[in-house]
Image (cartoon, rainbow, N blue to C red):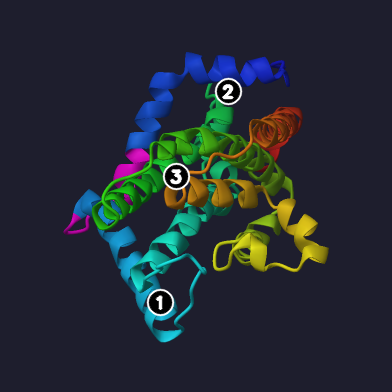
Amino acid sequence: MKDFSISPVTACVSLFRHWQLIVQLTMRDVASRYRGSFAGILWSLIGPLLSLAMYTFVFGIVLRARWGIAGESTFDFALTLFAGLVVHGLISEVIMRAPHLIVGNPSYVKQIVFPLEILPIVSLFSSLFNSAISLGLLLCIWAFTHHGLHPAVLLIPLLMFPLCLIALGIGWAFAATTVYFRDLGQLVSFISAGLLFLSPVFYPASAVPVAIRPVLNLNPLTFVIEGVRGTLINGTVPSLHSYLVYLMISLLVAIIGFAWFQRIRRGFGDVV
């Protein structure tokens, strides 16, 4: 029987060994979303534009919500809201797709030589493609409406990196667990919605009562959303200490998720 190592080094080795396969599967996954549509891959740009217009109308014009930023306009509110939605959209897409990665690809499971551990990586890269389009759109519009960008926005990829590790760890854990516990596939939508409303997406973290603010800080999205908005609006940079702590936690989540995937993958072929 094949030995499946749970060492985190194994994940890195698999990533570099199969990088060409990962790229091919990611490109195929992205292309499959828009195959057969008239606009094709342009939907990756049209979708965020429509979302931004919808949120501007509902929250900025109808509900007249504001963040309390000096000189804030309706469009400023929509862009600030959109920044939080981009961050949430990355991890949400990974979580929503994770339960179907193994059970939805029985042909891969039957192939002993196929590296199943790369499927969550492909899912993450595919989600990153969509998030990058949305983030690029956000930065372009902000630069156009605010006469440029603060250099601190260059740190946004670094802020997103720990969240990618957390998403990957959750993806490994959920993909493997769903093979034996199919009900998890029904719960992911509630988990995604919970992350949305328990994150400072529609409201600033400062609006949360001090007594329950520590609970909000346990949400893995809070640090990234506040960090991205801070760099975008004020050019502020999160403290190095907070970032390093968050990075260590994200590494731990990724290691645990991969270890769990490797430990229980032996029975995939018998169940799928």
Q: Label 1 crowding class (10 Å Cα cut-off): few <14, some 14-19, many 20+?
A: many
Task: Indicate left or right for 123 with 271 as reference.
Answer: left
Of 109 and 262, the residue lying toward us: 262
Q: Look at the image and tell me in which quarter the N terminus lies.
A: top right
Task: Indicate left or right for 24 with 106 as reference.
Answer: left
Image position of 137 with respect to 5: above or below: below
Q: Three-letter amino acid code at disc 2? A: Ile
Q: Is residue 169 shown in magenta?
A: no
Q: Label 3 crowding class (10 Å Cα cut-off): few <14, some 14-19, many 20+?
A: many
Which mark is nearer the camera, 3 or 1?
Answer: 1
Image position of 141 with respect to 263: above or below: below
Q: Quadrant of residue 50?
A: bottom left
Q: Quadrant of residue 141?
A: bottom left
Measure the C-alpha gap from mark 2 to mark 3: 27 Å
Measure the C-alpha gap from mark 3 to mark 1: 27 Å
| Label placed on residue 127 | 3
Q: Label 2 crowding class (10 Å Cα cut-off): few <14, some 14-19, many 20+?
A: few
Q: Give the residue displayed 16% in from the left and 59% down from the top.
A: 38
Q: Which residues are magenta?
A: 28-39
Residue on which the image places disc 1: 60
Of 144 and 263, the residue lying toward us: 144
Q: Three-letter amino acid code at disc 3? A: Ser
Residue 236 on image: x %, y %: 52, 43
Q: Look at the image and tell me in which quarter the C terminus lies.
A: top right
- Asked whether the viewer can see residue 198, the reply is no
Residue on which the image places disc 2: 112
Image position of 183 with respect to 168: above or below: below
Measure the C-alpha gap from mark 1 to mark 2: 53 Å
